[in-house]
Amino acid sequence: MTGKEPMATDPAILTEGISTGYGRHVVSQRLSLSVERGTRTSLVGPNGSGKSTTLKTLARLLAPLAGTVYLNGQDISGLPTRQVARQMAILPQVHEVPAELTVVELVEQGRYPHVGTLGMLRRQDDDAIEEAIRLTRLEDFVHRPIDTLSGGERQRAWMALALAQQTEILLLDEPTTFLDVGHQLDLLELVSSLNRDRGVTIVMVLHDLNHAARFSDRMIAMSGGDVVADGAPDEVLTPGLLRECFGVEAAVVADPKTGSPMCIPYAPIHSGSDGRESNE
Amino acid sequence: MTVTATVDRRGKTGVTPEVRTRQVLVALGALLLAVMFAYVMLGPVVFGPDLVLKALIDQAEELHHRISVWEVRVPRVLIAALAGAMLSSSGALLQSVLRNPLAAPATVGVTQGAVLGAVLALVITFGSEGALNDLNALVPLGAIAGGLAAGAVVYGLSYRRAGTDPIRLILTGVVVAAALSSVTSFMVLISGSHIDSIVRWLVGSLSTRTWDHLVFLVPVAALALPLVVLVIPLANALQLGDSTSVSLGLRSELARAFILMTAVVLAAGSVSVVGGIAFLGLIGPHLARTLVGSDLRRLLVCSALVGAVILVAADLLARVFSLDWIPFVDIRTESGSRIPVGAFTALVGAPFFLYLMRERMR
């Protein structure tokens, strides 16, 4: 549509030596990441490790302090933001729900990047909206105000908004934070099915390491703004990393059902307060 | 298609939101016409519907009917409806873009800026011809300039590195509003014998409003209308938060500035002709939200209608209570002018707002 067809060999997202942060507060420096198409990547790390800042920078919610983020091989800062929105959707960590807005009114907004400002004056009844509502199983809630929904339903409604954007890349910032374990699994299953069935590229920040290991092809562990481990879950989720990065003594075993690595932290390490002093 | 299936808001009604919205808007439109018609009927001389209709189609049997209807009541009711609609839709835009239920033209300083502009123009032109009957074109121009300037100052003071944010805007707005009010109070103190005229601008009044004022208001409204249509989709996306609106492909700061500017033009235009009507910019959108929800495509239309109905009805009451034939209620000001409509909206608005909040916070 736009004429600038990206090369199939380009990674979905690529950064070369970017610095991230807020104004004068630098979080990460010289960060180089490449996210291949059709993969599921999880960013993990302790609080303040820079994983959310990294995700926000990839999402263009934050401008990099230095360097460039490439989306499908093109400099993201040079692309019209609506064109980016047709390729990449973001589920932010915190949502602001206007009182009285209904689920379908929220999900409709996902069509903005496709139909533009004037197009959004009309009611959107695109298949994409119907599909987003079906995938998130919100059929019974379409006309309910979002502030009357439970936490799990609410998160699904925001997920449906991102799905209605019909993008090939989906970024999620701690999507499971306020959910109980059932709704957490539910959401991560949905994310994985999007990846499996439609080849959607997933990058997410997750707090739960076992979920990250189970629902990702690749884990990137960050600490103090730097990438300290990067690879398949069973390469990344090791007792050494848990000690170095999270400051806990932990056992790592294979999940009896899925076989993915699973950690069982059993004691914090009190010496080495910033958790970064490696003994390896 | 399943999305339009009939799962209603809280299981109260059996109709889809689209149908309900249409019903609400039609009912409000009919109510507005009814209140406007009653407005034209009532006054120092009460006309029956037949007399009003005859006068409206220029078949009045007596000249004074024609004059009362066409020269006094019709322009005044049209101004009330238009100014009420503009103030209320400005509040709806502000509440959405600032994501704050307390946002209104009067809480972000725009009303106060416009009032101060009008008062300054009044004070400057005192003594010159026509200053006291508010027909002086400098007064509405001063109000528009004051409102726009206040909006620009609030936006500028809220601007940091990457832009503004709703909380900073509203806090700055409250402070600027207070500062502007104190300047206006000072003007009142030093204005001596013209205090009555100034206070009516402060409170908001429709008395002595004629075609001249409408001729000033209509172009402002006509300028604002395309802006309003353009900002509706922007405001719908921006009310989901800055992150989500960027994810959807909006330039969020630009959208916010554009929406704010539209709200400021609407509010300043309204104040420029009727003065600082209290509470309408706050209550109109709240009432509309309970009727049609938060999607601005419906909310703005509904807010405009609600605002028009409220201001016309309030001025109708203000006029009725100012009449001589009501016993025991002789509440005219010292110089003989009528009760300003703004006194009514303030009196009724405050308790009504508290009631609305209690209902909605349940």
Image (spheres, grey):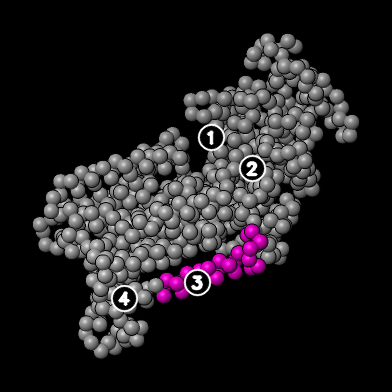
Q: Are the two marked residues, 3 and 1, in contact with CB atoms closer than 8 angstroms?
A: no
Which residue occupies 38% across, 46% down?
B108
User: At numbered mark 2, what does the secondary structure look like: helix, strand or loop?
Assistant: strand
User: At numbered mark 4, what does the secondary structure look like: helix, strand or loop?
Assistant: loop
- Residue identified by numbered label 1: A63
- Residue identified by numbered label 3: B27
Residue A91, disc: 2
Which residue occupies 13% across, 50% down?
B192
Q: Are the two marked residues, 2 and 1, in contact with CB atoms closer than 8 angstroms?
A: no
Q: Within 10 Å of the Cα at label 3, are there few (<14), some (14-19), or many (20+) other Cα atoms?
A: few
Q: Position of residue B188 (x, y in %)?
A: 19, 48
Which of the two discs, 2 and 3, sits closer to the camera?
3
**Label 4 marks which chain's residue?**
B
**Label 2 marks which chain's residue?**
A
Q: Position of residue A190 (x, y in %)?
A: 76, 45
Gap in angstroms between the C-alphas marked 2 and 1 = 18 Å
Q: Which residues are magenta?
A: B9-34
**Label 1 marks which chain's residue?**
A
User: At numbered mark 1, what does the secondary structure look like: helix, strand or loop?
Assistant: loop
- Specify the amino acid type for callout 1: Ala
- Residue identified by numbered label 4: B42
Label 3 and label 4 in one chain: yes
Label 2 and label 3 in one chain: no
Is B81 situated left or right of A45 in this image?
A: left
Q: Quadrant of residue A49?
A: top right
Q: Are the two marked residues, 3 and 4, in contact with CB atoms closer than 8 angstroms?
A: no
- Specify the amino acid type for callout 4: Leu
